[in-house]
Amino acid sequence: MSTSTETTPLTAAAAMAAAPPTGPSYVFPGVPSRSRRSQMRRFQCCMWTVFLGMIILALVIATNFSSYDPYTNSSTVHLLVDSDDLPMNSSDLFLLLMDIIDPIPDEEVIDWKFPAINASLQAEAEEFAVRALGDRELFEETISLTPVNTPAYRHYRSISTTPESRKLARRGYVEYHATLLIAKKFNYTKRPGRSNIGNGPRINLNDPTHFVKCDPKEKYRRANGTCNNKRNPRYYGAAYIPYRRQVAPDYGDGISAPRKSHTQKELPSARQVSLQVHRASYPTDSNFTVMLAVFGQFLDHDITATALTTSQDGESINCCTVPLSTHPECFPVPLERSDPFYTLYNATCMNFVRSAAAPTGIYGPRQQLNQATSFIDGSVVYGNSEQRQMSLRTRRNGTLRMYITHDGRELLPLSTNPDDGCNQEEMNSVGKYCFESGDDRSNENLLLTSMHLLFARHHNYLARGLQAVNPHWNDETVFQEARKIIGAQMQHITYNEFLPILLGKKLATKIGITSDPRSNVDTYDPKVDASIANNFASAAFRFAHTLLPSLFQATKDNSTQGSIELHKMLFNPYSLWAERGIDKAIELSVNNPVSRVDRFFSIELTEKLFEGTTTAEDRIPICGLDLVSLNIQRGRDHGLPSYPVFRKHCGFPSIKTWKDMEASIEPESLKSIREIYATPDDVDFYTGALSEPPIEGSIFGPVLTCIVSDQFLRIKKGDSHWYERKVGPQIFTPRQLKEIYKTKLARIICRNSDAIDRTRVLVMERRPSEENIFANCTELRNFNFSPWKEKIRSTNLTAVAFSNSETLIRVMTVVNSTMPPNFKL
């Protein structure tokens, strides 16, 4: 039997090497020596290894780093090799998250679906949209408004929409209605699955806010966050801009209608999801305190403030009239007759008004408006506009306005507006009022109000200390320097006390969340957009709602133990008027454990939210709202895609079937989810994310870990005024930065409470450790102002601007002490 002898030179040599001929090598011409054969074997092995490596690398790039997304016709960036056929366990996902050292690129914007729009059609679309706004405003003159001090009204007040936002929302309403007409002209119909109309050409409407002039030598932040990023001064992280989209929206009509099912069925009502998936359960997490949730809400209000649609006068729209309101911005939550709670009150509708449409300047899908700056800058204390800041200042010695009680305690300025959703007639009659602050939501609950008071007092503590070491500074300089320190300390607490709990210390350190005083690397990257992601604000960062317990254990004045129900602390800050009122509120926060982050919520939030009575006289009870239903409804309102979309965006294995979801959701949770959702593609992001088991070291699952870590990486790297920066006119000196690094929330509590004299060093944690010991406030209270002391140059004295006569006298005293005896001012 003959065999083929057709071989390449390399294979022939390999064959000879595998079976070398007998006898000396010189007898067989062309056969290499033994050492040469060995070298050739190594060379062949190397070449095959390189060749196979190149094939594998090409496959990885082709199938993972630029995989086609059928929903959006765009590419999705993956962080690791991602095989849909290979499920990842918790350890695999943790390792994947450890590689996220840079922000995850947002999904590519979808291209406009239509040809260019000519001037005639554009004019027609804009005229149609302006008429739609006019028709809406005429309709609003006849609608019924939400009664004051009802749960729905308090919910409206707890979100709050500023006059600036109402103006912008009018333009946003016009923009998306112009888009609706263009879509109709081109017979647009949304394709099945996640798709939208795409981003189109610019709209020919004047935008006076678009152009912003920046000073490259600015030392202090602007109140509204503009000019932080010099390349994109109006948009990257500024207040009053649309939320950033991590992934393309999934609107029911591809333009603005709330998200719908991807099947022929309807999505389950938000209340049904709340009842069946997020039912009441009360497991606690004894490792952490309620202060974790309180600081989290305070921080959330510093970086997010979604504007609601209101009437043209800023009033709350009532969508639950009889018959139901036909206002175009109503999206109420239907309540079934079989509802185990609301049927007791004969309620069939939960009021819900859509978030205001944000102006984008282009034709395209609806966006929502963030009224807050995206930077951690203390705007929750000072406000997001120059006007708000000035209204809160005394304009003397850099201090904030405070109300001084008869016993000398500082409280926040008083709100005397009877329609603020907080003030109660019987409390006002005895001289007790709710409060004003940099954020209209400050009265939402007692513990949040205490944080506002704590940081307002802290600002004044810093202002007085700075003025003492720099008596020549004017009011503006003292105010801005104290504000700058407040922002830096909030950043330091967030990234070194708060986020290591959320993400786990190991992950937070690895991806660059925690501070490194030894590093000389400048953190700022002007290419990073720090703007808040829509899904972060409207879903992911609302995880803290599940932390809140039903009951708070408290020590009464007679030293006996008592308890306070959560709903009784909502819009009820009056206990701060009592002696040691702030101390008792802080003690509630640091002495009570949080609930676990999971899919379960207390009935204090799902039945009694903002519960109240119609009037103080008749005491007719009114059932509260369901916060979980409102959160789910908000996500649908914003067009947030379903849970599997965000899993894929984070680079995790895709979920296409219920079987796929078994690897990511706890069995009992998945059972409840399957009973009411038709397909995994329908599962709300909020529900799916909270149903994941926690990942290693984190208090929540991998998707929330991914979304939260990405957003806070952006806030840090995209902030040109970040407190650890090494270059620029805004930096702290090394000595100043050393003092900032000593910051702990416990220190701020010790300095600014009424009489707290002992506390844990880490007030968000209950676990004892070498770091988290009990300490006397005398050891934590001091702040060293000497690094801020500025040398006075006599040649510059005539250029000093004095804000008042007291400052002038202090400066004269300082100068006189340095002058010869025969020279005095």
Image (spheres, rainbow, N blue to C red):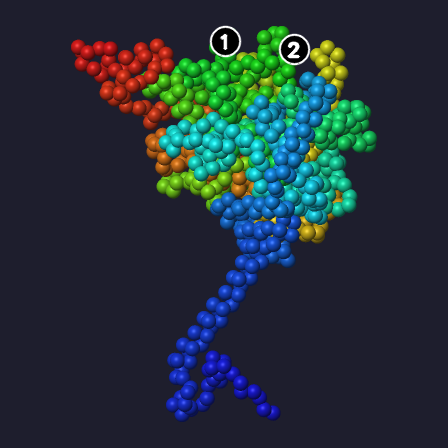
Decide which of 22, 535 is in the foreground and name it: 535
Q: Position of residue 551 (x, y in %)?
A: 65, 26
Q: Position of residue 625 (x, y in %)?
A: 71, 27
Residue 265 seen in the figure: yes
Q: In this figure, which residue is indicated by the disc labeled 1?
A: 407
In the rendered image, the quadrant that contains the C terminus is top left
At a point 71% along the width and 18% down the height, the residue shown is 147
At a point 42% along the width and 40% down the height, the residue shown is 523
Mark 1 falls on what kind of element? loop
- The count of marks equals 2
From what the image shows, is residue 413 above or below residue 497? above
The numbered disc on residue 425 is 2
Where residue 691 sits, quadrant-wise, is top right
Where residue 417 sits, quadrant-wise, is top right
The answer to which of marks 2 and 1 sits earlier in the sequence is: 1
Label 2 – label 1 distance at C-alpha:
24 Å
| Classed neighbour count for the residue bearing mark 1: other residues with Cα under 10 Å, few (<14), some (14–19), many (≥20) | few
At a point 40% along the width and 88% down the height, the residue shown is 25
Amino acid type, label 1: Asp
Q: Position of residue 760 (x, y in %)?
A: 49, 28
Decide which of 178, 197 is in the foreground and name it: 178
